[in-house]
Image: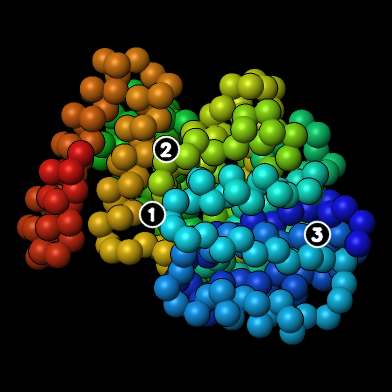
């Protein structure tokens, strides 16, 4: 096989069936039949039968213009570290970071690749993420700064017009009461979710990949920031033509992980890229956010969620 144009990197962790479903959906993308590509699966020491099932799936495939490589780790080093392992052996000119809990619809991969190939001004693009029921799921937003983190932590970004004045860290989906159309059209934004992140390999090489101090959540924000900092003219695009389903949270070990790690990801970003005074202020604001959410969920009778936010506040 000739060198691949596209390298697809998937991190696997105790998601045997979901990972196989993801792989099957990739091979349903008819546009990939004309494109040499490779799939690199990095398994983070799964305790289920993931490795066995992946190898069985590989052996069941017909010979084609693809290769499937497996890296079996003996420990779970996190999302960023595992992706960097895949990047070290990736040969494609374009890299697709794809979560194992995704399903490719129609020709989302080849469609996104064709778009990025024909738009040299862009370094990154993503597909429209959908929930299992096909409603639109949020994907990315704008880089953290004191203003949008403050409005997010104080829940001011839920008010009408605020997100039009202050570029939000997390834009709202159309189902939110303000009926924002942010995710209903192609547009530029600062960062996209790592569930489906198509990047030029050259941009990744210039930044040396992910910061491995991030275990999970927030690493794609930091990576996008460094790519933009390295090349201020580069663009990141959200596209509504290609679509995928993102189940979400399949690899989380408990319900507190996503909440705590999102907070920690923002703090890590400020610690690395902003001033010490800004870091301290954001840490204070995040504690207020976690505590206020705990109170709100307690009042609503959702004691389990209230407890999670209270415990999260104590860990920050």
- The percent coordinates of residue 105 (x first, y second) are 67, 69
**The C terminus lies in quadrant:** top left
- The percent coordinates of residue 302 (x first, y second) are 14, 65
* Numbered badge on residue 176: 1
Residue with the mark numbered 3: 37
Question: What is the C-alpha distance between the residues marked 3 and 2?
Answer: 30 Å
- Answer left or right for 246 relative to 68: left
Crowd tier of the residue under label 2, counting other residues whose Cα lies within 10 Å: few below 14, some 14–19, many 20 or above: few
Question: What is the C-alpha distance between the residues marked 1 and 2?
Answer: 33 Å
The relative height of residue 219 versus residue 54 in the rendered view (above or below) is above
The relative height of residue 31 versus residue 90 in the rendered view (above or below) is below
Crowd tier of the residue under label 3, counting other residues whose Cα lies within 10 Å: few below 14, some 14–19, many 20 or above: many
Tell me which corner region of the image, top left, top right, bottom left or bottom right, holds residue 187: top right
Tell me which corner region of the image, top left, top right, bottom left or bottom right, holds residue 190: top right
Disc number lying in front (3 or 1):
3
The relative height of residue 62 versus residue 188 in the rendered view (above or below) is below
Q: Say which element carries label 2.
A: loop
Nearer-the-camera pick, 17 or 110? 17
Disc on the earlier residue, 1 or 2: 1
For the point 82% across and 66% down, the residue is: 66
For the point 10% across and 64% down, the residue is: 303
For the point 87% across and 53% down, the residue is: 3
- Answer left or right for 139 relative to 291: right
For the point 44% across and 58% down, the residue is: 75
Q: Say which element carries label 3.
A: strand
Residue with the mark numbered 2: 213
Disc on the earlier residue, 3 or 2: 3
């Amino acid at each position: 096989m000739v060198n691949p144009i596209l390298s697809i990197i998937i991190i696997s962790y105790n998601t045997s069936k979901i990972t196989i479903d993801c792989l099957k959906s990739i091979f349903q993308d008819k546009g990939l039949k004309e494109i040499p590509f490779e799939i690199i699966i990095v398994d983070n020491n799964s305790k289920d039968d993931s490795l066995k099932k992946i190898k069985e799936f590989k052996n069941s495939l017909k010979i084609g213009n693809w290769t499937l490589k497996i890296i079996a780790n003996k420990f779970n080093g996190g999302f960023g570290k595992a992706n960097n392992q895949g990047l070290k052996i990736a040969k494609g000119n374009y890299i697709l970071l794809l979560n194992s809990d995704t399903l490719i619809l129609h020709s989302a991969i080849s469609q996104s690749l064709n778009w990025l190939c024909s738009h040299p001004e862009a370094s990154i693009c993503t597909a429209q993420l959908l929930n299992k029921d096909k409603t639109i799921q949020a994907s990315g937003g704008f880089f953290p700064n004191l203003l949008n983190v403050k409005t997010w932590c104080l829940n001011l970004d839920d008010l009408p017009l605020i997100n039009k004045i202050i570029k939000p860290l997390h834009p709202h989906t159309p189902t939110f009461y303000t009926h924002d159309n942010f995710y209903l059209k192609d547009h530029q934004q600062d960062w996209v979710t790592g569930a489906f992140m198509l990047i030029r390999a050259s941009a990744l090489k210039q930044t040396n990949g992910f910061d491995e101090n991030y275990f999970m959540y927030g690493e794609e924000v930091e990576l996008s920031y460094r790519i933009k900092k390295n090349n201020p003219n580069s663009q990141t695009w959200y596209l509504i033509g290609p679509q995928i389903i993102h189940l979400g949270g399949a690899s989380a070990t408990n319900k507190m992980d996503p909440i705590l790690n999102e907070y920690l990801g923002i703090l890590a970003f400020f610690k690395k890229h902003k001033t010490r005074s800004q870091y301290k202020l954001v840490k204070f604001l995040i504690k207020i956010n976690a505590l206020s959410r705990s109170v709100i969920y307690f009042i609503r009778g959702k004691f389990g969620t209230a407890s999670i936010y209270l415990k999260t506040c104590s860990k920050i």
